[in-house]
Amino acid sequence: HWPDFFIILTLLIANVLIGFLEERQANNAIQALKAKLAKQAKVRRDGKWTTLDAAALVTGDVIHIRLGDIVPADVTILNDTAIEVDQSALTGESLPVTHAKGEAVYSGSIIRQGETDALVTATGSLTYFGKTAKLVEEAHTVSHFQKAVLKIGNYLIVLALILVAFIVGIALLRGDKLLTTLQFALVLTVAAIPVAMPTVLSVTMAVGAKLLAKMKAIVSKLVSIEELAGMDILCTDKTGTLTQNNLTIGTPFTLNNNPDETILLAALASRQESNDTIDNAVIAAVKDKAALQDYTIKDFTPFDPVHKRTSATVTNKAGQVFRVCKGASQVIIAMTNLTATEKEAVDKTINEFAAKGYRSLGVARAAEKDQWKFVGILPMFDPPRADAKTTIATAFEMGVNVKMITGDAQAIARETAKELGMRENILDTSTLGSDGKNISPATIEAIEKADGFAQVFPEHKFEIISVLQNNGHNVG
C-alpha cells in the first residue's frame, strides 16, 4: 500500500519541518538580538589596555569599568574610589548600592557612578547570576501541552491495540484467513493512531507564532504558546516590570510647610552631570526648573560612603551666600539642632515612610558660617507602571494568580502590592529556608498561599517556581 505509506511519511516530514523552521527562525531572531546586546570589556593584558568580548574574559583578568557599563563578570574592586552599582537586574533593589575597594560586584550589574579597575573572580556559568541561569538550563521539563498530547496518543494507541486484539481473536475463532486478518488489523492500527495530530497542532501553533510576531513578540518554542494559554500562576518581578524602575520623590515633610522650597534646596545640593540616581530624581521633582537658574553653585561636595551626604555652597541673585546639604536622614538630623518636639515629629515621619517602604532623604541649610538648620525629609520610591494595575486586574479576572518576586524589602513589596490592588501576604526569603532540595511541607504550603516574596535572590526564584510546578501549576 504505497499511497498510504507516502501519505503518512509526508505528514511526519511536514510536522518535523514546520516545527524546525519556525523555531529556527525564532532562534535566529534571538541570536541577532543577543549579538547586538553582546557585552564588551576593557581589559589589561601584557601591560596594555584592549577591548574584548566579555565572553573572552578569564579569571585573573583586570578590567576597567565606568559609568554606564554592564559588569561583564563577577569582579572585586581594586581602586580606593567607591562606585555606585545598580543591582536591580539581580536583586530587584531599585536604589544603587555603593561598593568600595575589596568588595564584590556581580555580573549583570550596571555602574551608575564612578569608575574603577577590578579583578575578574568568576565568568560565565560560574558567576553569581550564571549559577542560577545554569540551573534553569538544566531543568528540562515536559510542558503541560506535551503531556496532554502524549496522554491522548497513548490512550488512542491502547484503545487501538485492545480493538485489534479483540478483532483478531474473533477472526481466528471464525476461521478467517490469517493473512487477511493481519492486514485488517494493521490498517485498523494505523488508522487509530493520530499520525496527523502533531502536524495539525504544529500548523496551528505556527499560525499563532506568526500573529505574535506581528505584535513584536518572538516565540522561541511553539509549545510555549499553549503553555501561556494554560497558565494559572504568573510570577513577576517588581522593579522595571510592575514599577517604572525610576526613582521618584513623593510629598515632602517640612518644618516650614514649604515642600517646593525643600525640593529646590535639595536640588541645589545635587549635580545633574554626575548622573547619580538620587540627584536625578531630586532635580526632576523641581516644579519650576527656571528657579534653579537664579542660583550659582560656588562649591560642591559629592556623596561619599563615609559622610553619606552631598553639600554645596550657593549664591543667590541678591548675592547672599548659604550652604545646602542632603543625605541620609539620620546624618542630617545629627548635624542640626532640633527641639525635642521637632525631632519627635521628624522621627515619626521617617518611621511612617519606612512602613510604606519609602527611603528618606534629609535636607538642611545654613548661612555661610552658621549652624545647620533642618529643612525637611524627602520620601523616595519607585512608582508603579501606568498599565500594571489594569494588567494584574485582568489576570485575576482570567483566573491567573499573580505572585510578586522582588529583591526589595518586605515593606516596599507590600506597599507596591497595595497600590496595584494585589493581596499583601508577602513572605521574606527567610521563610523559604536555605536548602532548596529539602523543602518542608510547611514551606511548600507557605509558597502556595503567598502573594509575593521579598528580599529574593536569583536562586530563590528557581526554588519558588520549582515548588509551584511540582504542585501541578502551570507557571509563567
Image: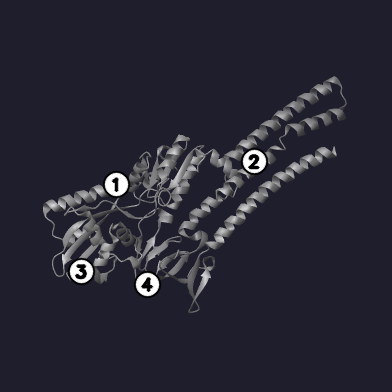
Q: Which mark is residue 204?
A: 2
Question: Could you tell which of marks 2 and 3 lies nearer the N-terminus?
Answer: 2
Mark sitting on residue 356: 1
- Residue, x 52% and y 50% (percent of image)? 136
Residue 444 in percent (x, y) is at 44, 39
Left/right placement of residue 154 relative to residue 114 reads right
Q: Which mark is residue 317?
A: 3
Q: Nearer the viewer, mark 4 or mark 2?
A: 2
- Name the amino acid type tagged 3: Lys
Residue 77, placed above or below residue 362: below
Q: Is residue 476 above or below residue 44?
A: above
Instruction: Please tell me whether mark 2 or mark 1 is closer to you in this view.
Output: 2
Looking at marks 4 and 2 on the same chain, the residue that comes earlier in the sequence is marked by 4
Residue under pointer 4:
79
In this rendering, which labeled residue sits more in front, label 4 or label 3? 3
Closer to the observer: label 1 or label 3?
3
Q: CA distance from mark 4 to mark 2?
A: 58 Å
Mark 2: amino acid: Thr
From this viewpoint, is residue 417 visible?
yes
Residue situated furthest bottom in the rendering: 47
In screen coordinates, is 18 left or right of 109? Answer: right
- Residue 308 shows in this picture: no
Q: Position of residue 351 (x, y in %)?
A: 23, 49
Is label 4 in a helix, a strand or a loop? loop
Tell which circle, 1 or 3, labels the residue nearer the N-terminal end. Answer: 3
Q: Disc 2 vs disc 3: Cβ atoms closer than 8 Å?
A: no
